[in-house]
Amino acid sequence: MLVKTPGNQETAAPKAGMDAEIARKYGRLGKLPSELPTAPRWRNRPAPFIEVWGESCALLEINTGLEAKTVFQFLRRR
């Protein structure tokens, strides 16, 4: 943890590889970044290509040389 006195914190933050403002934030919280909870990472909406995913995979298996824009055009048509 960074030193709690303001003058030393300004010096210690760059040595720890962080901005002084971020160091003050973690100083106020009294926790290290690794001790804080992370935000959930789940999907908020349904997968847009779920209906044609099997066809897309088959298309790529048949022709491995397809460019991304060709596959995207296929997806747009479907």
Image (cartoon, rainbow, N blue to C red):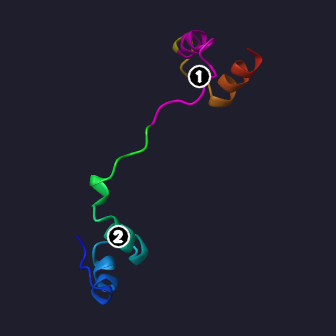
- Foreground mark, 1 or 2, reads 2
Residue segment shown in magenta: 41-60
Residue 12 visible in the current orientation: yes
Q: Which mark is residue 37?
A: none
Q: Amino acid at mark 2?
A: Arg
- Residue 62 sits above or below residue 13 on the image: above
Q: Residue furthest bottom?
A: 7
Q: Badge 2: few (under 14), some or many (20 or more) residues near its Cα, within 10 Å? A: few
Taking the image as shown, residue 3 lies to the left or right of residue 75, namely: left
Taking the image as shown, residue 3 lies to the left or right of residue 63, namely: left
The earlier-in-sequence mark between 1 and 2 is 2
Q: CA distance from mark 1 to mark 2?
A: 40 Å
Q: Which mark is residue 28?
A: 2
- Residue 49 sits above or below residue 55 on the image: below
Q: Amino acid at mark 1?
A: Ala
- Quarter assignment of residue 28: bottom left
